[in-house]
Image (cartoon, rainbow, N blue to C red):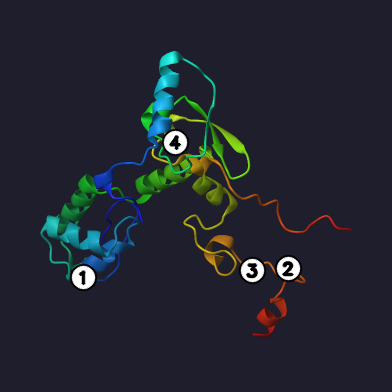
Amino acid sequence: MTRSAKKGPYVDEKLFRKVVLAKERNVNQPIRTWSRRCTIVPEFVGQKFEVHNGKQFVGLLVTEDMVGHKLGEFSPTRTFKGHGGSRK
Amino acid sequence: MPRVAGVDIPNDKQLRIALTYIYGVGPHTAIQVCKEAGIDPLVRAKNLTEDEISRVASVIDRNYQVEGQLRRIVNANIARLRDIRCYRGMRHRRGLPVRGQRTRTNARTRKGPRKTVAGKKGVKELHRG
């Protein structure tokens, strides 16, 4: 179920302020965040993030194509290294 | 047999059904097309006049994206998801269901034929059943 258009995209406000600030001051340090549910808005393009996946922070450089997705989509929470194998 | 939208040659079914043989035209769009072209959707495709066929073709041409064009758009969308390495893109790459379906059982359309794993619980029952 997609979010109601009436509400507009969900953007973490604190995070948004941080991004705007970082842009103004031209700091190119990744922003660490837990806000996986935050939608990527055009203002985020070019900004580096580190998105928590429950264990670590996963690096992410936002590109134009990513607008409209959520930050969490780029920080996988599961690791799957394949089944069995190599027991000989 | 009439030709509409490139290679498609719908047969001697009603026009509203025949049009659904075009990739990108379903039952709904088919009826919309008939309406726009001013043709009875229940007429058999083989009974259409040249003029009616060209009207249908032009309506589809003007208002809908079908066949190769549509396929390209869909593939481009999937390629985009793959490139940005988001969750949905990963699922496409791995050939697993993309929209959160279960994979413990089912999901055979995406995963392909079963690959039996020896010693896995339930394997015996599966083969007996």
- Find residue A48 and report its horizontal and vertical position in percent: 52, 27
Q: Which mark is residue A29?
A: none
Distance of mark 3 from mark 2, alpha carbons?
9 Å
The residue wearing badge 4 is A66
The residue wearing badge 1 is B44
Q: Describe the element under mark 2 as helix, strand or loop.
A: loop
Question: Mark 3 falls within which chain?
Answer: B
Question: Mark 1 falls within which chain?
Answer: B
Distance of mark 2 from mark 4, alpha carbons?
38 Å
Is the Cβ of the residue at disc 3 closer than 8 Å to that at disc 4? Answer: no
Distance of mark 1 from mark 4, alpha carbons?
47 Å
Q: Report the amino acid beneath label 3.
A: Arg
Q: Report the amino acid beneath label 2.
A: Val
- Could you tell me if residue A57 is visible in this image? yes
Seen from the viewer's position, the closer of residues B107 and A71 is A71
Q: Report the amino acid beneath label 1.
A: Arg
From this viewpoint, which residue is outermost toward the right?
A88
Please determine if labels 2 and 4 lie on a single subunit. Answer: no
From this viewpoint, which residue is outermost toward the left?
B38
Please determine if labels 3 and 2 lie on a single subunit. Answer: yes
Distance of mark 3 from mark 4, alpha carbons?
34 Å
Is B125 on the left-hand or right-hand side of B77?
right
- Find residue A21 and report its horizontal and vertical position in percent: 41, 20
Q: Which mark is residue B114?
A: 3
Is the Cβ of the residue at disc 3 closer than 8 Å to that at disc 2? Answer: no
Q: Is residue B46 above or below residue A23?
A: below
Please determine if labels 3 and 4 lie on a single subunit. Answer: no
Badge 3 crowding class, 10 Å Cα cut-off, few under 14, some 14 to 19, many 20 or more, is: few
Q: Which mark is residue B117?
A: 2
Q: Is residue A71 above or below residue B56?
A: above
Q: Describe the element under mark 3 as helix, strand or loop.
A: loop
